[in-house]
Amino acid sequence: MTDETTAGINRLRLQTLAVRETRRFAASRPKARAELNKGAAHYLEGVPLHWMNDWPLPHLPLITNAKGARVTDIDGYEIDDFCLGDTGSMFGHSPAPVAKAIRHQATRGLTYMLPTEDALEAGRLLTERFGPYKWQIATTATDANRFALRVARAVTGRAKVLVFNGCYHGTVDDTFVTLDHGTTINRPGLLGQFADLTANAVCCEFNDLGGVEAALAKGDVAAILTEPVMTNSCMVLPDAGFHDGLRALATQYGTLLIIDETHTISSGLGGYSAVYGLQPDLFVVGKCVAGGMPTAVWGLSVTTAARYAKVNASRASGHSGMGTTLSANPMQFACLRATLAQVMTVKAYAHMDKLAGRLASGIASVIAANDAPWHVVRVGARVEFICAPGPLHNGAEAALAHKPQVERAVHIALLNRGCLIAPFHNMMLISPATKKRQVDRLISAFDEVLTELFARNRP
């Protein structure tokens, strides 16, 4: 007999909800539709960034204002924002200290490739928040990861990077590999990819220390580049002892360990590394680190910095391959200083953690009440419902747990009820500006949607 369900939901009921909610959204945003019809054609595929087409909507809303944890669109809808720019605005939209810093710096110059007093204070605050690294500033975490890999290859004299199946590291070419029956291959679907990435990258499953050791034992891996938690699809938590094992193996085989906290900065003050005592050789964080101003930071441990200095001093003159002209500009430093000193605080994280716990508990209760074969994962302020049983252990399991049809229907239904979550998966973030009533509205909306989808009566 043919299975008539997806993620435990009757497919006809799922289709009925998806069609109805899509029509409801389209009917409710006439101004946005009219403006897009007039102006969107100037952009490739109708959007200024192609990722915007990942929103599961008949057309996009046009945002007129964002403040705290809410956005307002051109049709007048005020929406509780749990996407928060996919972590870029994790500390809320336009935090007051950051907005003040922008106003102050705006008339004093935007870029001049020289440091400021804010730069010096930001460096001190970075060390205070994240640890005793030797810091560099980039514009995106993609850039930061790219530069960190170049350092790792330079100091080790090795070519390869080890990444985990399904990882997230921005758009670093080297990381776009996956596993196919245990063999590392280029990820399917890459545009313009003419090089064989497997020449300089090897892929393992997250939580598989045996696989990691087998790869490192060949002696050609310069760096392990990893998130502390897999966040690119359905979240996967590390098994007990996994990070300790990863650190030990990296040391044993002379490989550098790079920790990318671009998403797991949600974990708490200083990110997952500070909360759980990880000891990377290089540390990367981007997105929200400067309150939403495009900024990333990457740091070298004291030992790694010394190794880098030795290699750098002996290289031939010429471009190092690291750095971009607009990075480390005074506006970044103004925002970075304001965020580290006044926004990214113990008090802020305590608020975020408390409400994220409330959200995770509420979502889990709704799932249990509907006897849905789903589960919830939380990493500090980051909460995700996954449309499959759990827990998940690696990227392969996470890919199978991803249910696009279900997620699209739930996402648009939640937006029609005033709640915005991330378009790429089922991620929800709590900011310092998020209110208890917003969390409760999201739980209530989720309850309404799941109650319909999992109704016991046949359609």
Image: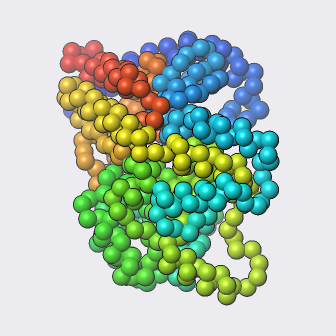
Q: Residue 299: horizontal and vertical position, in percent?
A: 54, 66
Q: What's the residue at 39%, 82% (across, down)?
A: 253
**Tally of marks:** 0
* Image quadrant assignment for residue 13: top left
Along the horizontal axis of the image, is 444 left or right of 455? Answer: right
Q: How is the protein colored in the picture? A: rainbow
Q: Residue 280: horizontal and vertical position, in percent?
A: 43, 68
> Does residue 1 lie above or below 134 as drawn?
above
Please tell me which residue lies in front, 28 or 224. Answer: 224
* Image quadrant assignment for residue 456: top left
Q: What's the residue at 58%, 74% (across, down)?
A: 151
> Does residue 396 lie above or below 444 as drawn?
below
Q: Residue 436: horizontal and vertical position, in percent?
A: 37, 25
> Does residue 23 lie above or below 11 as drawn?
above
Question: Which quadrant does the N terminus fall into?
Answer: top left
Please tell me which residue lies in front, 168 or 356. Answer: 356
Q: What's the residue at 37%, 64% (across, down)?
A: 278
Along the horizontal axis of the image, is 91 left or right of 49? Answer: left
Q: Residue 430: horizontal and vertical position, in percent?
A: 42, 35
Please tell me which residue lies in front, 185 or 69. Answer: 69
Along the horizontal axis of the image, is 228 left or right of 128? Answer: left
Q: What's the residue at 69%, 37% (across, down)?
A: 48
Is residue 302 visible in the rendered image? The answer is yes
Is residue 7 visible in the rendered image? The answer is no
Q: Residue furthest bottom?
A: 314
* Image quadrant assignment for residue 442: top left
Question: Which quadrant does the C terminus fall into?
Answer: top left
